[in-house]
Amino acid sequence: MDPVYDEALGGSATAGAGVPVPVWKRVLDITLIICALPILFPISLGLAILIRCVSSGPILFRQERVGLKGRTFMCFKFRTMFVDADKGVHEGHLEKLMNSGKPMVKMDTHGDPRVIPCGAIVRSSGLDEIPQLLNVLRGEMSIVGPRPCLPFEAKKYLPWQRERFETLPGLTGLWQVSGKNRTTFDEMISLDIAYARKKNPWLDLKIMLKTPFALLAQMLEAKR
């Protein structure tokens, strides 16, 4: 791995420090968050109460992820798994997907005992990722961009795959609206790189408009 990624994955550099982010992207992100806040606040409050009622432990889940230029940051999500869930199971599943060339099917597609009651619905709807808007406000993520990957995953990337770190990670992205669970790991990386090279305001808006339909399809697939 290149020195910049070795240092980032093993150090404590601030995500995106010293790396320019397009002004239009920050303006678009913050504007949309402000506009959506009246809707997202009551939804977030309801999810927080639900999680507290069905499972003991913190409401939010914090996990180290890799972002712009390979720098690490703490990513926030609503907790949808039991506190003592085995994280090694997910790493094994992900590594298998990276090497098998099979579609990126999530572990909980066929049921996952680690998921709390109602957690599968929250995950398939994407509502568990609402707290990542905090990461967007902090400049560690954008609304649109590649999925923020785990350090475990980033260390296994081939040189050509690291180009996906040339843009901020996002809540939704080109991969998410282009088939997602029907694509292979390499296809996901290729879509992320394509976005990193071509990103512009119109592409971001187009991806945002497609995201609700992609989430609906994901929910129907999870239900089946």
Image: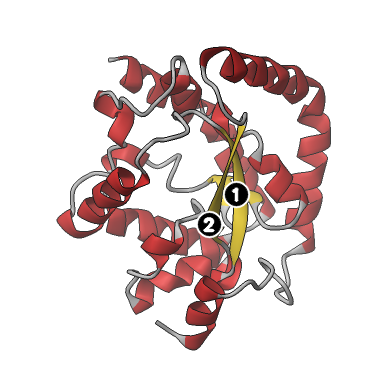
Which residue is denoted by mark 2 in the rendering? Answer: 65
The Cα–Cα distance between marks 2 and 1, rounded to whole angstroms, is 6 Å
Which residue is denoted by mark 1 in the rendering? Answer: 75
Dot 1: element: strand
Query: In front: 165, or 6?
Result: 6
Q: Is residue 104 left or right of residue 72?
A: left
Residue 124's quadrant in the figure? Answer: top left
Say if mark 2 contacts mark 1, CB within 8 Å.
Answer: yes
Position of the C terminus by quadrant: top left
Residue at (53, 83) in percent of width and height: 4
Dot 2: element: strand
Question: In the image, residue 123 lies at what x, y percent?
Answer: 47, 27
Query: In front: 221, or 13?
Result: 13
Residue 12's quadrant in the figure? Answer: bottom right
Query: In front: 54, or 205?
Result: 54
Task: Specify few, some or many for label 2: CA neighbours under 10 Å numbering under 14, 14-19, or 20 or more.
Answer: many
Could you tell me the amino acid type at mark 1?
A: Cys
